Amino acid sequence: MQNEACTYVIFGATGNLSKVKLMPALYHLEMENLLPKGSKILAIGRRDWDNEKWIAEVREMIKAKTKNGIDDAIFKRFSERLSYFRVDINVANDYVKLAQELNANATYPSNMAFYLAISPEYFADVTERLSKAKLLEENSGWRRLIIEKPFGYDLESSQALQKRISRYLKEEQIYRIDHYLGKGTVQNVLVYRFANTMLEPLWNRNYIDHIQITHSEELGIGTRAAYYDDAGAMRDMLQSHLLQLLTLVAMEPPAAMDAESLRDEKVKVLKSIRPIPKQAVNAHAFRAQYSEGMSEDGEKLKGYLQEDGVPADSVTETYAAMKLYVDNWRWRDVPFYMRTGKRMAKGQSTISICFKEPPLQLFKNTQVQCMSPNWLLLGIQPEECIRMEMTVKEPGLEMRTRVSSLDASYRNEDERHTDAYEDLLLDVIEGDRSLFLRFDEVEYAWRIVDPIIKKWAVERDYITTYPAGSWGPKECGRLFEKEKQCWRSSLTPECK
């Protein structure tokens, strides 16, 4: 069925998110003929630009993100959808003018999606002003609001933001975006789990020793000091992206693959996570900050405190790790280890599932040297893959073994890479909320990390450091339950 035409209204259209993600994603949807006929894209910004200037800017945005160059015919078709309208988001009368523009101009479809690619502090105010200008009323078509993370700064602020926004919108109109859930490999976790019955008997506490979820970045904070020094790694990544990955790995099979059934099961996981008492924070969480270091290429890397805009006495964490337990029948006493960090040795996102060792070591008196446990490795980015590691015998007369990897890679070489935002922007048009966050998901995620954030907020005297370009602080190893457990940093076989 052909989707209905809509008007995508993008607040903050001249900002970095629009430049790097939104406009290239919309262009690629145009390239694939997935944007409904008659749909329009209205950019909202404070700059005094006209349509011609905006279209030229968009061309440069797409050019910078397209490897094979711009197809002139496709861009001409795409540019016919583009318009620019000047709005100062703090001026109420500008919203009245915006409403007049949208209502008076018949070329704008009456279905409207408002994308808030703006600073989180403005989410509630912009929503209120859109409502007062009667732009959120569904008299002649649907209205949907897309909100970027973070949704709140902690549990209390997220509840306050929800209270304000829900005055003007029903829950089904709110699309809280987490771009991680749009990644093909993340969605493939659901297919891998629930379309392959051979895994189901093993997917529990009887066979799995522990699970690791890692998101590491080679880059530092760049020009984001103003945001990052207030947020830190726990809020920026763990509370949102990594807890979402945990829910997909740990959830029970949903009754159906519709949005509410899927999100119901994710919420059940979050509600089952064992609360961390204030006095146990140090046993379950660890933070650190990158100091000066060296890259693999020998380039000298600045420490966090040397970055532009960072206060000299900042103890904001650029590395955060956490140990959680899901107290339900399937996962009781299986530790879930999560970590994220800036300026680490390699940029990657992975889910590493370690299975228990055989109950009897039959080969202890032979020449077998390599007896690693089985691992199931899910590469999310940059390498998209699914691999199962198994111990096999080496060819030859002697009893020697090695680790072999069974590869079920996600993408063939001839298949086009799609950005997460392409899927998510299209889902908004289709009204599919399955990959967007319901408020109770957000709320329970904040409940999990809130005790940690509050304790770290009062411990302002000292923070552990790790060299930029490394895999993080060695002291973080104290989170592990067993001596044999350690961070898995590679998608290639590791023999221990």
Image (cartoon, rainbow, N blue to C red):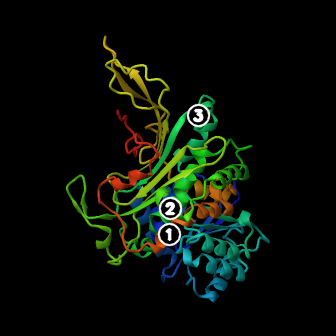
| Contact between labelled residues 1 and 2, with CB atoms less than 8 Å apart | yes
Is residue 79 visible from the viewing direction of this image? no
Q: CA distance from mark 3 to mark 1?
A: 34 Å
**Which of the image's four quarters has the C terminus?**
top left
In the image: residue 83, left or right of residue 403: right
The residue drawn where x is 51% and y is 65% is: 452
Query: Looking at the image, which is closer to me, 473 or 251?
Result: 473
Mark 2 burial class by Cα count in 10 Å: few <14, some 14-19, many 20+:
some
Q: Position of residue 406 (x, y in %)?
A: 45, 29
Nearest to N terminus: mark 3 or mark 1: 3
The residue pinned by badge 1 equals 455
Front position among marks 2 and 3:
2
The residue drawn where x is 54% and y is 61% is: 239
Please tell me the numbered disc located at residue 281: 2
Residue kind at label 3, given as amino acid type: Asn
Q: Position of residue 55 (x, y in %)?
A: 48, 70
Q: Against 388, is 379 above or below?
A: below
